[in-house]
Image (spheres, rainbow, N blue to C red):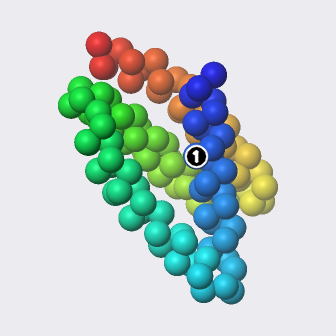
Amino acid sequence: MFYVIQFIIGGTVMLLASWLSRSNLHYLSGVITLLPILTLLNMRQQMKAMTDETFHLVQQNAIFGAIGMVLFTGLVFYFSSIWKPRQAVLFALGIYIVFMVIGKPIMAMLQS
């Protein structure tokens, strides 16, 4: 259940970031630019508060999530040349969800 909550929160942040980046308000563009900086600060806090093993586990999950986002973005780009945008996004989202659901047990097997 916690995994689903994380998925929803992460997706909402990315959706808001992409939506706000189209705005003419320049401070919103600054907020979008700040997201990677906040990620680095978060990693620094994690290094202080976590054991080495837990930190590596978190980073493995982050890399897995980043690969998923690259897959999703690439699929939307590719499918949008074939289908209408709505169909492209929905089909890419379906593949992304399958990737995340199937990949979670695979990551668990690799970590043990």
Q: Which residue corresponds to the image point at 67% horizontal and 85% vertical from the top-left?
A: 25
Please tell me whether residue 110 is drawn above or below residue 25 in the rendered image. above
**Residue 20 at least partly seen:** yes
* Rendered position, 76 above or below 106: below
- Above or below, 101 against 23 in this view is above
Query: Where in the figure is residue 54, as x and y percent of width and height?
Result: 30, 28
State left or right for residue 110 relative to residue 77: left
Q: Is residue 79 visible?
A: no
Q: Position of residue 23 (x, y in %)?
A: 69, 80
What residue did someone put label 1 on?
Answer: 10
Query: In the image as oriented, which residue stretches furthest toward the left?
Result: 52
| Quarter of the rendering occupied by the N terminus | top right
The residue under the point 36% across, 34% down is 58
How many numbered badges does the structure rendering display? 1
Asked which quadrant contains residue 106, the reply is: top left
Indicate whether 84 appears above or below 51. below
Determine the secondary structure under disc 1.
Answer: helix
Q: Residues within 10 Å of mark 1 (few under 14, many from 20)?
A: few
Q: Nearer the viewer, residue 109 or 51?
A: 51
Q: Is residue 23 left or right of residue 84?
A: left
Instruction: Depth check: give the residue in front, 48 or 3.
Output: 48
Q: Position of residue 88 (x, y in %)?
A: 70, 53
Q: Nearer the viewer, residue 56 or 42?
A: 42
- Picture quadrant of residue 39: bottom left
Residue shown at 42%/60% (left/top)? 38
Which residue does the image show at 39% across and 64% down from the upper left?
37
